[in-house]
Amino acid sequence: MDDGVWVVGAGRAGLSLAYALWEAGAVRSVVVSGRRPEPPPHPLFGPGGIRYVQGLERPERGTTFLVLAVADQAIPRVALELALRGEAPPACAAYHMSGALGTDPLAPLAERGYMVGVLHPLQALADPLRGARLLRGSAFGVSGDAGAVAQARRLVRALGGRVLLVSPGRRPLYHAGAVFASNVVVAALAVARRILVGAGVPSEEAVEALLALARGSLENVEVLGLEGALTGPVVRGDVETVDLHLRALEPRDRSLYVSWGKELVRLAEEAGLATETATRLWNILERGT
């Protein structure tokens, strides 16, 4: 791709995207702008790497992708400040990376001739180096005008990923689903660790064991699908074991077990669990509250 990318924001998301594009040789040039005088420590900024600039500038000619990788609340301000710096470079699309917001915060840039859209990586970007690797092959939730969507498709294709078209008005719902698949998983593992520690397992050993278990579950989902990957007492219809769990758990963990247990019952029914057994499980979970 003979494209230039200008990333505003030198945090985890911005650096992950910039590094992924640079490493893939997907673009001709990459510029990252940040607030500090010096770039953050990152292989991007070594010899032969990409350019870093402090503060906001009008993207140079040849920039076809302007990406605002800033906090949600900062997007309107940054978009306005960039708009005040002049007209869009020819054929340039401007995006933000928020999962929950639509294109409205980019209205000042649209008035300056930018195509506008949303480019949200459906990936857990906890670290810029690891994040760049994870972005290769990932899905991106994309919204925007026709030109911006077409540009986004090219960028995502260069990373070997796929586009999920999301209506701007439904982005909060889309983002909530993403949170369940990422942060809620982390929280579930933290709860599981707490319970294992309560059972006498050292914390570090508990995390190692739970990671292996979680990886196995995810691999099963990939091969067998969500319904086929279910294991454990609910899908077996083992009411007695579920009851035993509820009696053993502390109140805060029991409440979580009940909430997620009900979701497991619903999924187990889709996997073929008998209605009578599902009803017994549901009743015992109800009593657990």
Image (cartoon, rainbow, N blue to C red):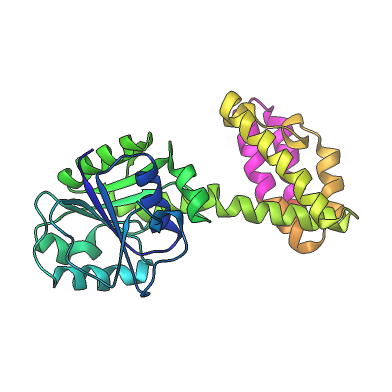
Front-lying residue, 26 or 260: 26
In the rendered image, residue 288, in percent from the top left (x then y), is placed at 77, 54
Q: Residue at x 18, y 61 (%)?
A: 59
- Can residue 124 be spotted in the picture? no
Front-lying residue, 97 or 104: 97
Q: Residue at x 67, y 52 (%)?
A: 188
Q: Read off the magenta span.
A: 260-285
Q: Say which quadrant the N terminus sits in.
A: top left
Residue 269 highlighted magenta (yes or no): yes
In the rendered image, residue 277, in percent from the top left (x then y), is placed at 74, 32
Q: Residue at x 75, y 38 (%)?
A: 280
Residue 173 highlighted magenta (yes or no): no
Front-lying residue, 83 or 262: 83
Magenta region, mostly helix, strand or loop? Answer: helix
Residue 246 is left or right of residue 5, and the answer is right
Q: How many marks?
A: 0
In the rendered image, residue 239, in percent from the top left (x then y), is placed at 81, 38
Residue 121 is left or right of residue 52, and the answer is right
Q: Is residue 58 above or below residue 137?
A: below
Q: Say which quadrant the C terminus sits in.
A: bottom right
- Can residue 266 be spotted in the picture? yes
Q: Residue at x 19, y 71 (%)?
A: 80
Residue 288 is left or right of residue 46, and the answer is right
Q: Is residue 204 above or below residue 56?
A: above
Quarter-of-image position of residue 156 = top left
In the rendered image, residue 159, in percent from the top left (x then y), is placed at 36, 38
